[in-house]
Amino acid sequence: MGSDISYGDFVREATIQQKQISYDLVTPRPEYDEEGKEIPHSPQKFQLRGIDIYRLLSPYISVRLKSQIKAVVPLALYLIFFQLVILRQSVLDHWTITAGLLAVIIGLMIFMEGLKLGLMPFAEIIGDHLPKKSSLKLVLFIAFLLGIGVTFAEPAIGALQAVGSIVDIVKAPYLYTLLNDWTDQLILVVGIGVGLAAMLGTMRFLHGWSLKPMIYLTLIPALGLTTYCMTDDELAKIIGLAWDCGAVTTGPVTVPLVLALGIGIASAAGKGSSSLSGFGIVTLASLFPIIGVMMLAIYISSTVSVESIIQAAQAVSTVSQTAVPWYEQTPIAEIILGTRAIVPLVIFLFFVLKVIIREDLHDAGIVTYGLTLSVVGMILFSIGLSYGLAKLGSQSGSFVPSAFAQIENVQNSPLYSYSIGISVALLFASVLGFGATLAEPALNALGETVESLTNGAFKKSTLMYAVSVGVGIGITIGVVKIIYNIPLAYILIPAYTVAVMLTAISSEEFVDVAWDSAGVTTGPITVPLVLAMGLGFGNAIDTIEGFGILSMASICPILSVLITGIIITARIKRIKRNSEEKTKIAGVVAA
Amino acid sequence: MSKRKITVLKNVALITCIVQRGLGDEIFKAAREAGAQGATINFARGTGVRERLGILGVAVEVEKEVISIVVSTEQVERVFEKMFIAGNLDTPGMGLMYITPLEKAATYIPPEILEKLEGADD
């Protein structure tokens, strides 16, 4: 056997032509200075040819571009297809919208890369070092401030401002003033909510608290305030906004940054890494802002009267008709917005890093590059948000009702008989919700985590379908709410009551997953689209406000995942019982 | 109890290929089409080339995938070449691959193949 020449060796010698060089010729020789000490070798920079740069950059860009295209393009195509084919309406301003969507894709791509290279290293270093160098109180305080900072940096938050102008001031004055005159305070209370959630979530990391009592304790004031707002005609109109804010906050900046900090703190304390303890922050971060926004609205209603808001707005509108100041024009306004979103967060993180924990960044150059990218990406994204996503969403939202109702801008509306038209509108909403959620990259990631954490009991596809079906149903219910003008509280209160009851009988892991899945699904593309669609829809059929769809899209997946979890637990129990019986029988037989 | 038989494979080689995270699938696809049976993928972190690329270093992911493929010595060169081309390893920062000779390997071998080979030996 040994003396034979193997066929492999033969093939190698005969067919493959390789140029071989010795690695010895390539590696550097040690160099010595005058005293005979060895000089540490420092590698030279590569001289890159044009083709190398191209080959280096093309996969880098195409991978990142593709993931954003995958998230944006199918959704936009669906909306445009629906508008063209089912509603037979041409897309208005299609060039602006295309350019806007392009800006969204590129902006998000740049922003996500910037987030990874620029902001994440900060959060990781701070999470690692902070607990070792300072007291728990300070750590929690910094977690709180970070929560506020990341809220301002969240791209989806800009959607609130972008859709604010669609609200009709006379019909819902408090809603209008919240979204136009009090936006900064609105984002601040949302931020405080996220900050508190970050604090509590960190405490949960450290002490391994159960999520269940936290959910109960947060829902009591949230539902209580909702009931209180219901009693006031004017306040009732902001309930939708308040509950939608919860869904808006938990986006691609908040979740990873706050989690990185929390996990760092927990592992530094020698605790944590209990498989599912990373969950829960997202839930709290989407529940606390709801309470905050309602409290802000109640405060405004007690200090400002309805008449003064309308008067002030009319005064502004007469002024602004003459000339829009230069700093409120595109792209200056977006540049200011983008810078204002990121820079304070960075200064804060830098301050914590330098002054409190006195650490240096590795790769300062790359971090600077990342931060620049995140600012540039944010600016591009905000431009695209108002010209692409919000415009497209509100347009299709305002055309969809033409399927069943008479709409001014649409000839021969209603296009279909009432019952068919309503079904068309609802089908549109449910497919939109289902498809958009299934395409959300965050859901895919959550699915993978959950599958590995539950040892495969909760399959990735099961979770993804459970959540997507939930969101589809949720958006449909939200649309029904707008069409028939059902007060949101009538749906929210029973839905959350059921959710609490299901929570009580579910096991801890499924509770964590279910409540978090709601926050995860509403990303930077779905949020503005759905918000704008709801408002456009509401305006077209003359309802007071079109908020509430997102909040429905949050609660329904919670319910669907909880129910799936209960079914899975029951099935596992049954299988176990069966196998136990079998072993018993086997034991008897063997005896 | 009967003695268990182990069939050991000779003439095996290991190809290890280190590339940026996410690019491994493409490379394994090429290897599979060239006849490789399976791959083990480890996650790792790498350093060195980023620093030498200057600002373009950001295009190189720090997180790596280490793809290990066991092949026969007959196919090793072919698989190696296909993987090299699929991974564009002649581009700076794209990765490194090498072949290690293996003494023996053992795994599941489909019984019909075993029978066929034993028949041929006898």
Image (cartoon, grey):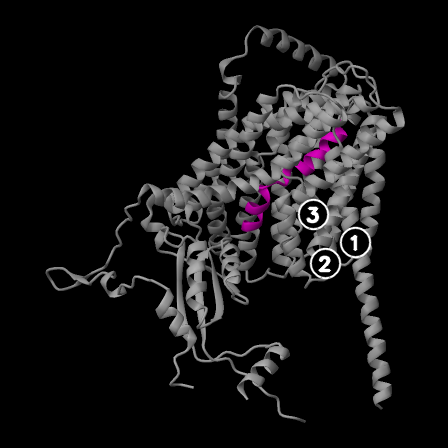
Q: Position of residue A72 (x, y in %)?
A: 61, 36
Chain bearing tag 2 is A
Measured in 3D between alpha carbons, the distance from the residue under mark 2 to the one under mark 1, in whole angstroms, is 9 Å
Which of A411/A579 is in front? A411
Q: Earlier in the sequence, mark 2 or mark 1?
A: 2
Give the amino acid type for the residue marked by disc 1 in the picture: Thr
Asked if labels 2 and 1 share a chain, the reply is yes
Spot occupied by residue A80 in the image (x, y as percentages of width and height): 68, 28
Is A279 in the magenta?
no
Q: Which mark is residue A106?
A: none
Q: Which mark is residue A564?
A: 1
Seen at 48% across and 66% down, the residue is: B68
Q: Residue at x 44, y 73 (%)?
A: B73
Question: Looking at the rendering, in which quadrant would you find the C terminus of chain A?
Answer: bottom right
User: Along the line of sight, which residue is nearer the eye, A309 or B4?
Assistant: B4
Letter of the chain that mark 3 sits on in the rendering = A
- SS type, badge 3: helix
Q: Is residue A258 magenta?
A: yes
Residue A458, labelled with which disc? Answer: 2
Marks 3 and 1 close (CB-CB < 8 Å)? no
Q: Label 1, secondary structure: give it.
A: helix
On the question of residue A457 being in view, the answer is yes
Query: Within 10 angstroms of label 3, few (less than 14), some, or many (20 or more) residues?
Result: many
Q: Amino acid at mark 3?
A: Ser
Can residue A545 be seen from the camera position used here?
Answer: no
Residue bearing the label numbered 3: A517
Q: Secondary structure at mark 2?
A: loop
Q: Nearer the viewer, residue A506 or A43?
A: A43
Answer with left or right where residue A513 lies relative to residue B40: right
